[in-house]
Amino acid sequence: MTISSTGTGDVDPAVLSELARLRDSIDNIDAAVVHMLAERFKATQQVGHLKAAHQLPPADPDREGRQIARLRALAEDAKLDPAFAEKFLNFIIAEVIRHHERIAEKSANGDPTPTI
């Protein structure tokens, strides 16, 4: 198989059709991931408000460690690189902590408005 400079000129139409099918599947998965992340952040925002209301710290290193270990095991079971899964979760955790800090700051300043 050869590929032209445009990437599709000399490619078998069946290959292009399969490529389009696979990319449609990837697009659907990406949409599901975004929606799942939105739901996760809605829940973590509620956690942030609960922590702020009870003067609990924004971060919980013990829980984070358990979650990382849990996610690494899930990744291994799913044949996904556990190091990648850990990096992904660390990125999410950092964003959650940032949200919790902002919620705590607003709460300390008398702003009870939820930011979900």
Image (cartoon, grey):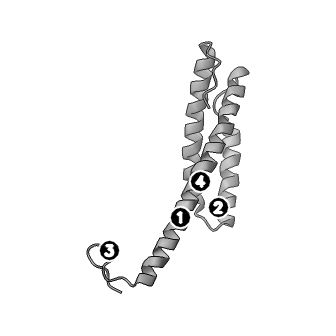
- Answer whether labels 3 and 2 touch (C-beta < 8 Å): no
Q: Which quarter of the figure is the N terminus placed in?
A: bottom left
Amino acid residing under circle 3: Gly
Q: Residues within 10 Å of mark 1 (few under 14, many from 20)?
A: few
- Answer whether labels 1 and 2 touch (C-beta < 8 Å): no
Of the image marks 1 and 2, the number of the one nearer the N terminus? 1
For image coordinates 62% across by 12% down, the residue present is: 110
- Of residues 9 and 29, the one nearer the viewer is 9
Of the image marks 3 and 4, the number of the one nearer the N terminus? 3
For image coordinates 70% across by 40% down, the residue present is: 62
Label 3 to label 4, Cα distance in Å?
28 Å
- Residue 33: mark in rendering: 4
Amino acid residing under circle 2: Ala
Q: Residue furthest top?
A: 110
- Answer whether labels 1 and 3 touch (C-beta < 8 Å): no
Amino acid residing under circle 1: Ile
Amino acid residing under circle 4: Val
Q: Name the residue under label 3.
A: 7
Locate residue 73, reporting x and y percent.
69, 59
Locate residue 5, reporting x and y percent.
26, 74
- Answer whether labels 3 and 4 touch (C-beta < 8 Å): no
For image coordinates 63% across by 68% down, the residue present is: 79
Of the image marks 4 and 2, the number of the one nearer the N terminus? 4
Of the image marks 1 and 3, the number of the one nearer the N terminus? 3
Total tally of numbered discs in the picture: 4
- Provide the secondary structure element on which disc 2 rests: helix
Q: Name the residue under label 2.
A: 75
Locate residue 86, reporting x and y percent.
59, 53
